[in-house]
């Protein structure tokens, strides 16, 4: 039921790319009644753009009004709020404040408020005193803020995992380590070549390939958009900083000094970032010391008390930016192809809205299957710091990762899961939080390796003859 | 109700347990969050343990076993202390769920760990194969190796411990990299490394960035201003130990900005009169034998506390760091008719001059000549009687 090697079966839909958008589209297609396969080149889902973002559920208050992005973000927001509780996904209510530090920043507020109104999002202007009252940890020279109550924190990995899981539970097929290398369409059927595996056949292909979107698009046509991945670096502060503030602190978008977001995460850390650096690398983004140091200083400028807190880790993500500001979504009716490209930083929130839109395009252009009845719902394990975790329960078994308090049982469950087992070490970390804490694996790497060795080959090798335990 | 709960079954905690048990304290337990007692020495498969406290030359696991056997009190493994509150309240996560225990005295002996890549803000990609000495040694001890030809970052004592582990694990490091012009560990460790292990030690060399996709493929380094790439399949960040003081911190006990551990007085008490701290949680990093001796010393103070014989916290005289001094502990001292207090300090940079403890009027209380490197611990003996009537002490170097 999980992953098949069946190359000769014919699918209604083949989705290329298992990021947050691909996972949401996968779910929507399966629930719409289409026989669907998701093809992911990586060893696990969420290995590309979706592995690194700021983990915020956006209202879309600052989206360009009347764009597809604004519509999908708004719809995605509403859909997530509708379905999250059913799958044990959470929303950590925090609200966001666009904070002004200068006269120029303040001058932008009317525009921000007007834009939010056009997007149908309620916001409220706070003067300097009100801003400080809401968040006393803000630096003293704060001039005012626009409060967006509806912006919240979510788990950026459990959510898309839940979408894919629901698709699989309801009959969808996931193929990982399935890199699409090309394809031809004959008599209304796409035959997609997969590196090292049998070809996959489907009537309709949906390109959700993220940072590879233009390269995959070239299978059907010269890509009308080019991806120039935009790198965003982040600094993660220790959980000791978690109680300094609650509201997401957003920059005024046009400040000359590039602003950064300072936000808590649902896992209990504080996150600062991102930078925005256009570049060519599509796969392995780099962090660099000077930019990380600049981010750290920017965070101190906004929340001075962060100086007293340690950095836990750093990371970088790649957003699939194109030459266009809006999403690039269209159905090519004569080609059996739907393009879902240029989904930039709003993809986490927009995904469910995008998926709904894609299914509408599919129904309009290709086929109109009967929606699934009696839909199975996955239950996701909770990783949100503020809610009860498994280590708190009786009969918890040993704790493997002490910084994040991850039990051996949780790690084994993620590795041995029958529906969607961890396929990479990154996938295991995203599912459980192991090795993600302040010691970054000093205490738990060995135990995690012992547990993971049989399931994730290649991480460690046994020491050969001649080794003796002391 | 316990008499004493000890948090952490490493050298400091187990040594304290032994002293308390021998003194006849009845209700003691050592709480250990991992599955087995012994602390970090469990994973150091080379000689060099037990000399100070057992008068023996053992490998780490043997020493860990000796500490455990000598403790003679219940050691509750798989037991995590999640918080401490005033009044001797200890919040614990066990196999039975979350519980609240009480103790007349609590000893924090939560130890130390190395600084991993993240807080060092190192450039590059984030592939598999980047680790710390501690994690590397634990894997090798269990017969696993995550790489075959890593680069070792740092040249502290533990960096050479990583070299020894590498040999056990049939791992051949391509180089050891040190930013400074000399190695941090005492000579002749560098000669030893080069001669015995055949690992080149590159001084004046900075790690520029980590290369690789899924796995480490190399590192860019800068040696004497010149950049080049070293091929390797792993990176071991060694040393830069920090106290594992998160429990103290989240329990509201003040940490010292110099030591990064909880502040203590000369009786090993934190600012909560029922909570004591000893070993490497006080400051990073001393050899396990030193941590063990501190555990014993703290236990003797706990015995006095149980008899109500320790001075009132408010009578303590605070010590602050002045010119040239990076950290000092204990941070609070008591005047007494007799006896001596040993102050420990580390310097910011290489210091040569007179290390002087002076009072609020600038009068010298104790002093000695020093010529030390920043990572070395310096001791200064202070007469407790000399502290009478003082309100503030300052430790500084006069050149």
Image: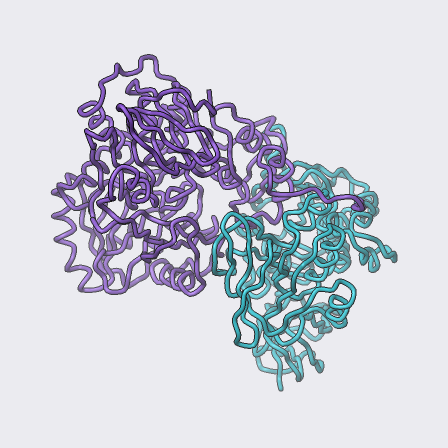
Chain colours: A purple, B cyan
Look at 57% across and 36% down and name the residue there: A456
Q: Is residue B294 above or below residue B14?
A: below
Q: Is residue A164 above or below residue B50?
A: above
- Give the quarter of the image for residue B309: bottom right
Picture coordinates of residue A23, whole percent (x, y): 36, 32
Q: Residue at the right extreme?
A: B55
Quadrant of the drawing holding the N terminus of chain B:
top right
Left or right: residue A64 compared with residue A398: left
Question: In the displayed image of the protein, which residue is found farthest to the top?
Answer: A374
Front in this rendered view, residue A272 or A372? A372
- Residue B369: percent from the left, percent from the top? 71, 82
Q: Is residue B264 shown to the viewer in this render?
A: no
Q: Is residue A358 visible?
A: yes
Residue A15, position as x, y percentages in the image: 34, 31
Q: Could you say which is closer to the camera, residue A400 or residue A171? A: A171
Residue B247, position in %: x, y? 57, 48
> Which residue is at a point 22% across and 64% down the rendered structure image?
A102
Residue A120 falls in image quadrant: top left
Q: Residue at x 80, y 46 (%)?
A: A466
């Amino acid at each position: 039921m999980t992953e098949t090697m069946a190359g000769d079966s014919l699918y209604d839909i083949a989705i290329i790319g298992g990021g947050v958008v691909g996972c949401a589209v996968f779910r929507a297609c399966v629930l719409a009644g289409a026989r669907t396969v998701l093809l992911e080149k990586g060893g696990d889902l969420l290995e590309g753009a979706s592995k690194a973002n700021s983990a915020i559920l956006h209202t879309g208050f600052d989206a360009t009004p009347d764009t597809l992005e604004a519509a999908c973000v708004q719809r995605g927001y509403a859909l997530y709020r509708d379905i999250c509780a059913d799958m044990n996904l959470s929303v950590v209510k925090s609200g966001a404040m666009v904070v002004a530090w200068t006269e120029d920043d303040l001058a932008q507020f009317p525009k921000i408020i007007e834009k939010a109104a056009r997007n149908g999002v309620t916001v409220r202007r706070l003067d300097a005193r009100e801003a400080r009252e809401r968040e006393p940890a803000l630096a003293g020279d704060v001039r005012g803020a626009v409060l967006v109550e509806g912006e919240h924190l979510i788990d950026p990995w459990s959510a898309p995992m839940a979408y894919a899981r629901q698709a699989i539970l309801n009959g969808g097929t996931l193929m990982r380590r399935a890199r699409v290398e090309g394809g031809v369409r004959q008599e209304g059927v796409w035959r997609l070549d997969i590196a090292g595996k049998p070809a996959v056949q489907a009537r309709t292909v949906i390109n959700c390939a993220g940072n590879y979107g233009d390269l995959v698009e070239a299978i059907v046509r010269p890509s009308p958009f080019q991806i120039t991945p935009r790198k965003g670096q982040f600094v993660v502060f220790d959980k000791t900083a978690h109680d300094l503030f609650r509201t997401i602190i957003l920059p005024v978008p046009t400040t000359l000094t590039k602003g950064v977001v300072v936000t808590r995460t649902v896992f209990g850390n504080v996150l600062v970032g991102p930078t925005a650096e256009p570049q060519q690398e599509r796969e392995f983004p780099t962090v660099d010391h000077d930019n990380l140091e600049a981010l750290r200083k920017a965070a101190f400028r906004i929340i001075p008390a962060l100086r007293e807190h340690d950095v836990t880790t750093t990371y970088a993500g790649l957003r699939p930016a194109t030459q266009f500001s809006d999403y690039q979504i269209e159905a090519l009716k004569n080609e059996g192809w739907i393009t879902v490209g240029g989904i930039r930083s709003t993809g986490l929130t927009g995904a469910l809205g995008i998926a709904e839109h894609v299914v509408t395009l599919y129904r309009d252009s290709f086929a109109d299957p009967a929606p699934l009845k009696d839909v199975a719902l996955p239950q996701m394990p909770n990783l949100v710091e503020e809610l009860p975790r498994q280590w708190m329960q009786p009969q918890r078994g040993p704790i493997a990762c002490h910084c994040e308090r991850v039990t051996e049982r949780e790690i084994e469950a993620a590795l041995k899961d029958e529906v969607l087992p961890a396929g990479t070490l990154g996938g295991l970390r995203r599912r459980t939080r192991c090795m993600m804490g302040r010691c970054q694996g000093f205490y738990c790497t060995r135990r995690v390796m012992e547990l993971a060795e049989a399931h994730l080959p290649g991480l460690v090798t046994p020491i050969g003859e001649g080794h003796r335990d002391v | 109700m316990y008499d004493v709960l000890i948090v952490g079954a490493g050298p400091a905690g187990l040594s304290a347990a032994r002293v308390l048990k021998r003194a006849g304290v009845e209700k003691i337990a050592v709480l250990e969050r991992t599955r087995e007692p012994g602390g970090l020495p469990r994973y150091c498969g080379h000689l060099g343990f037990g000399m100070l406290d057992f008068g023996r030359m053992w490998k780490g696991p043997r020493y860990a076993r000796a500490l455990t056997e000598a403790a003679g009190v219940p050691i509750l493994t798989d037991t995590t202390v999640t918080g401490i509150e005033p009044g001797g309240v200890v919040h614990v996560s066990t196999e039975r769920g979350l519980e609240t225990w009480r103790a007349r005295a609590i000893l924090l002996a939560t130890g130390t760990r190395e600084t991993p890549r993240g807080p060092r803000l190192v450039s590059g990609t984030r592939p598999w194969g980047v680790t710390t000495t501690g994690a590397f040694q634990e894997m090798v001890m269990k017969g696993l190796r995550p790489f075959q030809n890593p680069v070792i970052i740092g040249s502290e004592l533990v960096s050479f411990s990583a070299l020894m582990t590498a040999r056990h694990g049939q791992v051949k490091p391509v180089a050891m990299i040190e930013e400074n012009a000399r190695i941090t560990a005492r000579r002749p460790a560098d000669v030893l490394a080069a001669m015995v292990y055949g690992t080149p030690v590159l001084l004046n060399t900075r790690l520029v960035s980590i290369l690789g996709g899924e796995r480490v493929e190399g590192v860019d380094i800068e040696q004497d201003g010149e950049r080049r790439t070293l091929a390797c399949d792993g990176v071991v960040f060694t040393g830069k130990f920090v106290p594992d003081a998160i429990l103290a911190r989240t329990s509201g006990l003040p940490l010292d900005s110099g030591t990064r551990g909880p502040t203590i007085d000369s009786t090993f008490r934190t600012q909560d009169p029922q909570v004591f701290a000893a070993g490497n949680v006080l400051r990073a990093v001393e050899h396990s034998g030193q941590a063990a001796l501190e555990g014993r010393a703290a236990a003797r103070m706990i015995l006095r506390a149980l008899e109500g014989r320790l001075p009132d916290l408010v009578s303590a005289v605070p010590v602050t760091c002045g010119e040239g001094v990076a950290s000092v502990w204990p941070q609070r001292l008591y005047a007494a008719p007799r006896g001596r207090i040993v102050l420990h300090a580390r310097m910011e940079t290489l210091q040569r001059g007179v290390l002087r403890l002076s009072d609020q009027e600038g009068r010298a209380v104790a002093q000695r000549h020093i010529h030390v490197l920043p990572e070395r611990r310096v001791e200064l003996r202070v007469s407790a009687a000399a502290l009478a009537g003082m309100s503030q002490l300052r430790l500084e170097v006069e050149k």
